[in-house]
Image: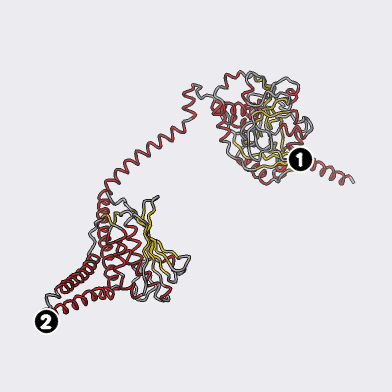
């Protein structure tokens, strides 16, 4: 019995010793938190969001410390705190004096209100109808928590400086009450202040808690921010960070960060809280730079120096741009010297290529005219055969008269003269045909002249006269009265018109004779100073399948055709400053429309 009692006593002593040792061995992690509202249930509010630390780090005990701004500063300076949670402005101010760094950022939503963002709002009593804009605050008393309050005084002061250059002359009386910030609303409603500056969303939170009626407050200086549900008078900035102090070693920092990243969202009543990696706080640094506070407090306040420092990034950029311009100029000069010869050689080659191309185009047009004359060869032979046959008949008749040895020879003198005149007329007609052929076939001289358009069209009809007779068609020519002459190239126009007429005749080969029709019309477009020549037929019209390819080289529907007529005709028309189009007629058949300027730019 005595031995059993001794064993039980030894075991109890060992157990008690283990418990004591575990308590002694538990390392405490001290976290200071800015208590800007002086919450009565402070630990109940914050501990759930940090419970993952105790879960993932059982060898440590979490100790929370509600503190003011000054208390947090002292705790960091005395190495009493391992971590702290505060507003982003306080973090920037601390970073200028102490080695603190953000590990994570708190995400906090209360009934959908984004408490994870920091902004500032200016409110007044609903009865103050005279206060609507920031400029109405001149000479008034405004309540705020503290000059170090980022989500209140500092953001509002920065907003005013950004909007107005004369803010120092406004004579605003700032009254700082200290924490908690909630008391500012009560003092406003008691008419102790004309207006107050709060952190954004605080008024909505107080309304949810039943502490204030939002209808008794009115916003001053509305700032429109999409999807932001709270009243706001400033820009919105990142939320509160969890800061690591110099006291914390890397191992502990990694453990804390890993524990926070593993934690899920915590839902308490209407609050949702969780942690995420920190975002950039550069925008907060820019606010402190503009206000010359925190790490920028030592910057000069001389207006000129202030302007230069505020815009120093532009000067850096301008200097860098100047260097780039100098380097670019050196490189450009080098490239110019290097490429001058290449450019001159390229231009010379281009000029030679253009000359060759022009020569080939002239040769192609010349060959096209020979091809067209080949198509009209039978008709030309007939045109020459008629006057030559007449010449032969008149000559033989005159010879027979001259061989007669009778007294009536003198009486027939008049008939002989008439026969001789007919011989001369027929010879002139044959010569004219040959002259027209030679003119049409000789190479271009490039000369432009003032031309009467109606005789030119009649001349084109003359070239195609035999084809027209073979088709048993009587062409119709309709012209406006008093048509002006045009300054153009005679041979090119003849070639275009001859091509269009022969195309129209080819289109009516399979059409009954009594249905065939060839109509030419000439009209003046006085508004655009142009002439319009239309060649219409009563053929089968233009097939939709080939309509888009009509003007492509070697495109033809005739077995014996080369497919160059329309392509060359459009090229010639464009060279003359005009336009050639083909379209179907509503009454059947097709119509070619040639538009020509009366006086193109080619004339000097």
- Place of residue 473 in the rendered image (x, y in percent of width and height, measured from the top left): 37, 72
Q: Residue 399 versus residue 234: which sits nearer the camera? A: 399
Question: Where is mark 1, residue-wise?
Answer: 270
Residue 170 lies, with reference to residue 341, above or below; the image says above
- Tag 1 secondary structure: loop
- Tag 2 secondary structure: loop
Badge 2, how many Cα within 10 Å: few under 14, some, many 20+?
few
Q: Residue 14 versus residue 186: which sits nearer the camera? A: 186
Residue 443 figure quarter: bottom left
Which disc number belongs to residue 203? none
Q: Earlier in the sequence, mark 2 or mark 1?
A: 1
- Place of residue 55 in the rendered image (x, y in percent of width and height, measured from the top left): 72, 44
Q: CA distance from mark 2 to mark 1?
A: 141 Å
Residue 300 lies, with reference to residue 228, above or below; the image says above
> Going 65% across and 25% down the picture, which residue do you hit?
70
The answer to whether residue 85 is visible is yes
Q: Nearer the viewer, mark 2 or mark 1?
A: 2
The answer to whether residue 21 is visible is no
Find the residue positioned furthest to the right.
1
Question: Where is mark 2, residue-wise?
Answer: 404
Residue 448 figure quarter: bottom left
Residue 428 figure quarter: bottom left
Left or right: where 160 falls relative to 180: left
Left or right: where 412 falls relative to 81: left
- Place of residue 568 in the rendered image (x, y in percent of width and height, measured from the top left): 33, 64
Residue 475 lies, with reference to residue 97, above or below; the image says below
- Place of residue 67 in the rendered image (x, y in percent of width and height, measured from the top left): 70, 28
Badge 1, how many Cα within 10 Å: few under 14, some, many 20+?
few
Q: Residue 488 versus residue 33: which sits nearer the camera? A: 488
Q: Residue 24 versus residue 528: which sits nearer the camera? A: 528
Left or right: where 100 falls relative to 65: left
Residue 291 lies, with reference to residue 380, above or below; the image says above
């Amino acid at each position: 019995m005595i031995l059993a009692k001794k064993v039980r006593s030894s075991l109890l002593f060992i157990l008690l010793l283990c418990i004591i040792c575990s308590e002694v061995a538990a390392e405490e992690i001290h976290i200071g938190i800015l208590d800007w509202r002086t919450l009565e249930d402070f630990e109940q509010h914050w501990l759930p969001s940090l419970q993952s630390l105790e879960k993932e780090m059982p060898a440590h005990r979490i100790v929370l410390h509600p503190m003011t701004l000054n208390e947090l500063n002292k705790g960091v300076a005395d190495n009493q705190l391992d971590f702290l949670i505060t507003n982003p402005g306080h973090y920037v101010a601390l970073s200028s004096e102490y080695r603190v760094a953000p590990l994570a950022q708190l995400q906090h939503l209360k009934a959908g209100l984004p408490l994870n963002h920091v902004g500032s709002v200016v409110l007044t009593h609903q009865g103050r109808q005279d206060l609507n804009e920031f400029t109405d605050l001149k000479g008034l008393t405004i309540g705020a928590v503290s000059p170090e309050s980022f989500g209140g005084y500092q953001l509002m002061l920065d907003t005013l400086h950004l909007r107005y250059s004369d803010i120092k002359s406004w004579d605003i009386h700032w009254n700082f009450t200290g924490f908690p910030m909630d008391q500012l609303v009560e003092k406003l409603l008691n008419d102790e202040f004309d207006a107050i500056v709060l952190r954004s969303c605080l008024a909505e939170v107080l309304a949810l808690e039943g502490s204030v009626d939002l209808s008794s407050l009115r916003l001053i200086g509305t700032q429109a921010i999409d999807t932001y549900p709270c009243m706001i008078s400033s820009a919105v900035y990142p939320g509160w960070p969890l800061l690591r102090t110099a006291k914390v070693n890397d191992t502990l920092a990694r453990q804390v960060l890993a524990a926070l990243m593993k934690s899920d969202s915590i839902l308490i009543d209407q609050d949702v809280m969780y942690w995420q990696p920190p975002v950039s706080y550069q925008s907060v640094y820019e606010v402190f730079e503009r206000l010359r506070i925190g790490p920028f407090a030592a910057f000069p306040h001389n207006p000129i120096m202030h302007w230069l420092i505020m815009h120093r990034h532009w000067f850096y950029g301008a200097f860098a741009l100047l260097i780039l311009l100098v380097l670019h100029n050196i490189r450009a000069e080098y490239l110019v010297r290097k490429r001058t010869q290449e450019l001159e050689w390229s231009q010379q080659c281009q000029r030679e290529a253009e000359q060759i191309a022009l020569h080939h185009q002239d040769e192609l047009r010349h060959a096209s005219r020979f091809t067209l004359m080949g198509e009209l060869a039978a008709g030309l032979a007939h045109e020459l055969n008629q006057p030559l046959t007449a010449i032969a008949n008149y000559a033989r008749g005159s010879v027979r008269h001259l061989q007669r040895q009778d007294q009536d020879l003198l009486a027939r003198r008049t008939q002989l003269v008439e026969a001789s005149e007919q011989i001369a007329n027929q010879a002139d007609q044959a010569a004219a045909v040959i002259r027209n052929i030679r003119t049409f076939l000789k190479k271009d001289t490039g000369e432009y002249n003032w031309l009467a358009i109606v005789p030119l069209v009649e001349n084109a009809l003359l070239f195609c006269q035999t084809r027209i007779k073979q088709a048993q068609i009587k062409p119709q020519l309709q012209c406006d009265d008093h048509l002006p002459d045009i300054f153009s190239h005679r041979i090119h126009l003849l070639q275009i018109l001859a091509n269009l007429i022969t195309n129209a005749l080819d289109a009516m080969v399979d059409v009954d004779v009594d249905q065939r029709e060839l109509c030419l019309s000439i009209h003046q477009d006085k508004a655009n100073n142009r002439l319009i020549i239309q060649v219409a037929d009563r053929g089968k019209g233009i097939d939709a399948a080939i309509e888009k390819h009509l003007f492509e080289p070697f495109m033809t529907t005739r077995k014996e055709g080369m497919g160059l007529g329309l392509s060359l005709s459009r090229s010639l028309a464009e060279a003359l400053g005009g336009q050639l189009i083909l379209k179907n007629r509503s009454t059947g058949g097709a119509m070619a429309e040639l538009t020509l300027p009366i006086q193109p730019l080619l004339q000097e």
